[in-house]
Amino acid sequence: MTDEGDDNGMGFVIIHPGELGVSISAHWWIQGSVLCQHIYRRLYSATEPMDTVKRPVIACVWELALINAEQEAWRKTMMKSEPSPSAYMDDRAGFEAA
């Protein structure tokens, strides 16, 4: 994150153990309003992770709900005249997982 520059020093990680494999996605904010992502996906039966270049997955429908909650929290707490990192960190998604 730091090597890529322009980061806000804040982000979130989603660890999703699914039926067929696990996805781990790290997200961070840059330039005040841009969300970046690195994703690791591996089927439980595989010895190597999936190629995320040939199969450019963004997220599953459940992860998208969390990503949306994070962007809403970011907009509400950080994209104003006096950004509040502590308010961003304290914000919680207002829904339950399926």
Image: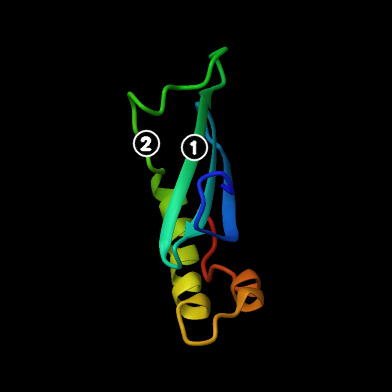
Asked which secondary structure carries label 1, the reply is strand
Label 1 sits on what residue type? Ile
Q: Quadrant of residue 88?
A: bottom right
Identify which residue is drawn at 59% across, 61% down.
10
**Of the pair 18 and 23, the residue shown nearer to us:** 23
In the picture, the disc for residue 57 is 2
Residue farthest along the top direction in this orientation? 47
Q: Are marks 1 and 2 in contact (CB under 8 Å)?
A: yes
Graded by Cα atoms within 10 Å as few (under 14), some (14 to 19) or many (20 or more), the crowding at tag 2 reads few
Q: Quadrant of residue 33?
A: bottom left
Graded by Cα atoms within 10 Å as few (under 14), some (14 to 19) or many (20 or more), the crowding at tag 1 reads some
Q: Up-down: is 4 above or below 21?
A: below
Identify which residue is drawn at 34% across, 27% down.
55
Instruction: Provide residue 12's location: percent of width, then percent of height.
Output: 58, 55
Instruction: Provide residue 82's location: percent of width, then percent of height.
Output: 54, 86
Label 2 sits on what residue type? Val
